[in-house]
Each structure stands twice: as C-alpha cells, then as structure tokens.
Amino acid sequence: MPEITLYLANGACSLAAHLLLEEIGIPYKTVVMKMGPSGWTAVDGSIETDEYRRTIHHAGQVPALKVDNEVITENPAILSFIATLSPERKLAGKTALENARTAEWLAWISGTLHGNAFGLMFRPSRFCDNEAEHDKIKQKGRERVLAAYGIIDKALEKKDFPVGEAETVVDYFTVPFWHWGGRVGLDMSSFPNYTKLVKRIEAKESAKRVLEDESVKPAQ
Ligand SMILES: N[C@@H](CCC(=O)N[C@@H](CS)C(=O)NCC(=O)O)C(=O)O
C-alpha cells in the first residue's frame, strides 16, 4: 500500500476523499488546511501557502492527495485513484459502462455543479472584474445550483445509486455539495432523493468519524 496523505479543509470538497479513505479503511494521514491571507496554509504550521502551491497543488486548492512521492490533484482523479486502492469494492463501477457513468458523474459534479454553479456563487470575481455585476452572477450561480440539485434528485427517483445498483465514488462526491446547499440557505428537503443518499453515506461509522473530525453536522 502506498503512503497516502490527504490535504483537506474542513467541510470543503475534500470531504469526499476523506469519507472514502476512511470508509475503505486503509492507513492515511491528513494535513488540515485553513484559509490564510493569500491562500490555504496548514493549521499545524507544517506547510505555508507559497510552499503548498510550489510543492503540492499548483493552483493552491484542496484536495490534494500525496501518494508516496507523487501528488494527485482534481477531485475526479483523486476519487478514481482511491477507488483503485480497494479493488474488491468496485467503487468506480462494475462494468466498462458503469466505469464510464462514474467518470461522467465525476466530471459533471466537478465541472458543472462545483466549478460552474457554486463557482459563480462563491467566486464571482473569477468570472467578471466589475464588482457591480457580482450580485447578478451570484444569483445566476444559485439558479444553477438549484438546477443541478434537481438533476441529482431526479436521477435518484427510481434508484438508490447514481451508478448501477451499488455504491461508487460518485455517491461520496455528492456529499460536500449537499452540505453547501444548507450553508447558502437552500432548502435541502426539496431534494428528498439526494438527501436520502447523503444520509445513507453519513450513517456509516466511518462517515460519522470524518464528519466529527471536520466539524460537519450530519444531514437531517
Ligand atoms: N477542480 C478542483 C476544484 C478544487 C476547489 O475548488 N477547491 C476549493 C475548496 S472546495 C478551494 O481550494 N478553493 C480555494 C481556491 O480556489 O483558491 C477539484 O475538483 O479538485
């Protein structure tokens, strides 16, 4: 087994990788980051923002997964890699088609829900320099988040799992974004199927430990 270190921030999108690592039960370490004046910096002082950008994550973001002497960035790549650490669980799907469906969901959650919808809400300055436009951009982001939640909820209308008939890394990747909805004041009870999925993941003993560790209140 390689030596694994996850760079995470409490409640951030890195929660998905943290939940998965704990669930598959392999040894791993975490470095908890907090937001400093110019970017993420380690809570325990072990790595500062500049060094983090230089040696761990080129864009200074979380998550980053150090695997022996290599670093993997980008949630879809990190989650796909973690799936390979527990091959018997087939967390990237059971067939070639399910593998493709897993990749499809990971790309969509990362690009559309996270980057494009929450990105507009949380980082309007990345899309437009004119501050006067930022409220409109945030509103557009909110609409896109709601539309994306609707897509997840509908996909789970007649089935329990996003891919096939068993859990994959996709289930875990949906969890942080469910919590963000509540944080920005959205009524998550409007998405009962999505909420059911998150509750199923969070009922695991592994997830309970991670949520407590990251001070995230379990889904109600
Ligand atoms: N596309 C990246 C996005 C990662 C990302 O946006 N992480 C956020 C935390 S949820 C972050 O580090 N934000 C700080 C920043 O972008 O400067 C991925 O999927 O890993």
Image (cartoon, grey):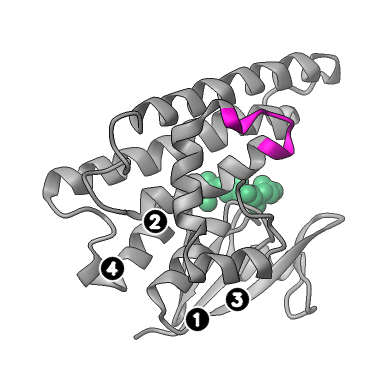
Q: Which residue is mark 2?
A: 77
Residue 41 is situated, as x and y percent measured from the top left of the image, at: 76, 66
Three-letter amino acid code at the position of disc 4 = Thr
Q: Secondary structure at mark 2?
A: helix
Alpha carbon of mark 4 to alpha carbon of mark 2: how far?
11 Å
Q: Which residue is mark 1?
A: 28
Q: Is mark 2 within 8 Å of ligand 1?
A: no
Q: Please check the rendered image and state whether residue 186 is part of the magenta-colored stretch, yes or no.
A: yes
| Lower sequence index among marks 1 and 4 | 1
Three-letter amino acid code at the position of disc 1 = Tyr
Q: Please check the rendered image and state whether residue 47 is part of the magenta-colored stretch, yes or no.
A: no
Does the rendering let one see residue 220?
yes
Looking at the rendering, the stretch of residues picked out in magenta corresponds to: 182-189
* Mark linked to residue 121: none
Q: Which residue is mark 4?
A: 84
Q: Which residue is mark 3?
A: 30
